[in-house]
Amino acid sequence: MSDTWALTSSLMGGLGLFLLGMGLMTDSLKLAGGFALKQVLEKGTRSRIRALLSGFGITALVQSSSAVTVMVIGFVNAGLMKLSRSIWVLYGSNVGTTMTAWIVALIGFKVKVDVVALPAIGMGVMFYTFSRNIRIKSLGGVFTGLGLLLFGLQLMQHSFTGVEQVVDFSRIHSASLSNLALMVVGGAALTALMQSSSASLAVVLTAVSTGMLTIEVGAAAVIGANIGTTVTALLAVLKASANARRLAMAHLFFNLTAALIAFVLMGGMLGLIGWLSHAQGVEQAPAVTLAMFHTIFNIVGVCAMVPLTEHMTRYLKSCFQSQEEQLSRPRFLDKVTAESPDTAVKALSLEQQRLMRKLGELLQDTAQAVPGERTPESRFVVAKLISAINDFIADCSRREMTTDVAETMQHSLRVNSRSVAVVECLRELHKDELVISDLPEKVATAILQLRDMINKVAQHGCKLEELDAKELIELLHQFEEHYNHTQFLLGLSAQERSIEMRKMEQTTLYLSLLRRATRQYTKALLSMLHLEGRAEGQYLSASI
């Protein structure tokens, strides 16, 4: 009993030191080069190869695929990185994380702890404690982490040396299919519990190097560890955006694919590694063999995903759709509709009517100063819908069409162009909200009246089937008169010094953006009426 407790405590202590050292190394490296890592991820993903190399390089540097995965998911969630490129970063990250196994195999079991680890800890603590320079402190953290990592490995190695005297492992020595499958599950579970593939790999490599596990059984556990590392990504996207969830599923699909290939070809891969070692006259160390196996099957996995990634990305884009993405999908436009010009014109009209209603609702929110959370999402829906309509028009333009249909398409593009201008104005308006209560009373009252008039224009757009062009033009002329009156009151307040200059500039910009948004929306509505034959051409060139 006492021997069992001693071995267990030694193993737990060694694993704890390894995890502490790995965590300290990772945090220190991120602190030393965190900004540079973000820059690489943001700029180094312009092509698939660059994205792959960026993922490999960063993960090999910080020694944590989980940290890189979570960072990439954060960028995708924030819209700073495209899904198609971020997938390749994760492929590279999976290859980069195999460097941990090489560090353990080539350094962890080859050096004497008292020669390397203890001096590294001493020097690292000195740097970390006495230096005020953040870079030097980070370097101290790296040295300390490396020393703790190596010290933890030695403790685990000593623990596994005596484990066979207490526990009978003869049942899992055989490389039967059931044993290998069990070890894959065990490796995945161990990694999921530890939230670190590096730690589980260290345990497996140590067990193999001490002879407790055979190479085949250890290889199965390494495959499982590769699968288990996806749990971190899956946990990170529980409440994330649709794109972030798609990325996590792509990560899972890649790791399962690589694991399946490795499991099926395990005997051939291990045989090839043994043959290469023999041909080079190199001693076949079990830990080195597993490190090479880990690297090879991840590289093979990347090669296997090259022809599959585009299809997988297309499929994932149809999954995990958020409410905003569902609303932004066209209801009347598709490739079949684009084949027939007459049908395409009708479908385009219906879709743009829907666009005008959504844009009107967005303008109403701004006019009523609604503080709700749906405004940014509504802008996203409108912007995506405009883009989808433009794509449909471009698809139709590749086909033969009559002059009338071509003119209709041109008018539809103008509607979209004006709609884009409205969205841009509303985005600028929401960047710096104007507090009406801080303005002189007469100016505040005039702005509120101006908002009421904008609200009426927006209501007209939400009821497009009842819209009258003359009534809309008259309403906009009244808006222009009231806008000029509000500008006059604002200038008068400045002369009376009842408003600060900065506040006046902010209010002037606010009024200008409101006016531009209203005018562009009105022009878009008139273009829609003209397309439906309910407004003469003179209204389009009216002085508004």
Image (tube, rainbow, N blue to C red):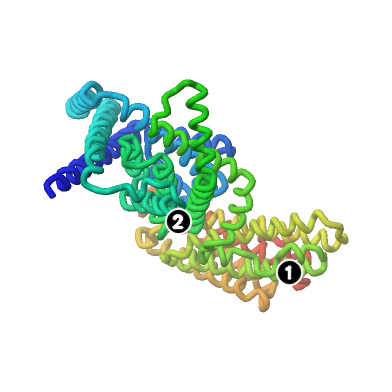
Q: Is residue 508 visible?
A: no
Tell how many labels: 2
Q: Which mark is residue 334?
A: none
Q: What residue appears at the point 62 percent right and 76 percent down from the top-left corner?
A: 463
Q: Residue at x 58, y 45 (%)?
A: 305
Residue located 75% across and 73% down the image: 534
Name which quarter of the figure residue 282 lies in: top left
Q: Return the residue nearer the eye: 300 or 524.
A: 300
Horizontal side of 180 relative to 22 (left or right) equals right
What percent of the width, then of the height, locates residue 168? 27, 48
**Residue 109 visible to the viewer:** yes
Locate residue 349 relative to residue 206 in the image: left or right: right
* Image: 471 above or below 106: below
Q: Residue 212 at x, y = what percent?
A: 31, 41
| Amino acid type, residue under disc 1 in the picture | Ala
Nearer to me, 484 or 173 = 173
Residue type at the position of mark 2: Leu
Q: Is residue 511 left or right of residue 461?
A: left
Residue occupying the far bottom of the picture: 466
The numbered mark at residue 490 is 2
What residue does disc 1 label?
Answer: 347
Residue 459 position, x and y percent, is 57, 73
Classify mark 2: helix, strand or loop: helix
Residue 129 percent location from the top left of the image: 18, 29
Mark 1 neighbour density, 10 Å: few (under 14) some (14–19) many (20 or more) = some
Check the image and report above or below for 345 versus 106: below
Q: Name the side, left or right, on which 106 lies relative to 314.
A: left
Mark 1 vs 2, N-terminal side = 1
Q: Secondary structure at mark 1?
A: helix
- Identified at 46% across, 56% down, the residue is 430
Q: CA distance from mark 1 to mark 2?
A: 46 Å
